[in-house]
Image: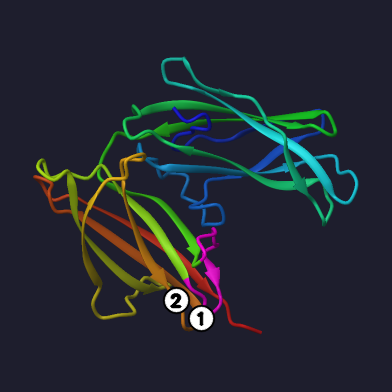
Amino acid sequence: MNTTMVAGLFALLQTVSAQGLTLENFRIPNGVYGTSRPASQAFLPGELVLLAFDLSGLKVVGEGRSVYGVGLTMIGPDGKVLVDQEPRPTEALLPLGGGRVPAFVAAELPINLPPGTYTMNIRATDFVGKTEGKGSRQIEVSPKKFGIVRITNSFGTGDAAPNYGLPGQQFLLRYSLAHCTLDPKTLRCRAEIRIRLLDDKGTAITTKPLVTEIRDVLDETTRVCPCTYPIQPNRPGRFQIEIEAVDLLATEPTSAKIIYPIVVIEPK
């Protein structure tokens, strides 16, 4: 199991400050700089989970330099410790001062992770200031079902991107299909993808959705089917990308849908 593994998310975060170091503003983004997921949205086995937060109270030395680490302990529904990772030194630059940096832990949830409530304990260490901080959260993993997971936005270079930009910029929305029905002979999934572009009120901008069919093998490591959708906004405004996937090999009608908001800023 991945040593930074965390699971889906529901319960209220409990923040504890020890000796001056504080973990706060916890959030679950879609990608490092993406929009936050709703607190009520559970995670499926096979998802990539990012738990982001702000680390405050770091001691800064020299020209805005600090060294910190984040560790993770996860306890399963049966009380067993599944992960026990100690904080490792990471150098960070704080050119604006303030003793605060954004931090996160990442996790690939195994495709066969059992459902249930897990407890995730985070430990942060300031290796320069010799201080520590802790945070704890109860989290929930849902049973396996067909779904769209691992949603993130990136630039054309592959670097992580936020959900906003300027007209003319090129982005790539990445997502994956999890728990697809596989063809017993080819071991390939077969799914129909329907993409609609909407305004901020949910009204379709185009008259017909973009419809494509996916026939692909699963990623050997994650056991999900990766997909992409290129974005090149041409005008400012607030928009939504609606992606609906239909499992064409399922014995009963099975579909999943996501809506990813994007903001295009007027250049000034």
Give the amino acid at mark 1. Answer: Gly
Q: Residue at x 34, y 75 (%)?
A: 203
Q: CA distance from mark 2 to mark 1?
A: 6 Å
Q: Residue at x 53, y 32 (%)?
A: 4
- SS at mark 1 in the image: loop
- Asked whether residue 163 is drawn in magenta, I would say yes
- Asked whether residue 162 is drawn in magenta, I would say yes
Q: Nearer the viewer, residue 190 or 56?
A: 190
Q: Main secondary structure of the magenta part?
A: loop
Q: As drawn, is 20 to the left or to the right of 259? A: right
* Disc number placed over residue 39 in the picture, else none: none
Residue marked by disc 1: 168
- SS at mark 2 in the image: loop
* Disc number placed over residue 232 in the picture, else none: 2
Q: Residue at x 42, y 62 (%)?
A: 173
**Residue 49 locus on image (x, y percent):** 47, 42
Q: Which range of residues does the magenta coloring cover?
A: 157-170
**Residue 171 locus on image (x, y percent):** 47, 69
The reply to whether dot 2 and dot 1 touch (C-beta < 8 Å) is yes
Determine whether 165 is above or below 58 in the image: below
Disc 2 packing (10 Å; few <14; some 14–19; many ≥20): few
Q: Quadrant of residue 221?
A: top left
Determine whether 113 is above or below 225 in the image: above
Quadrant containing the N terminus is: top left
Disc 1 packing (10 Å; few <14; some 14–19; many ≥20): few
**Residue 125 locus on image (x, y percent):** 74, 31
Give the amino acid at mark 2. Answer: Gln
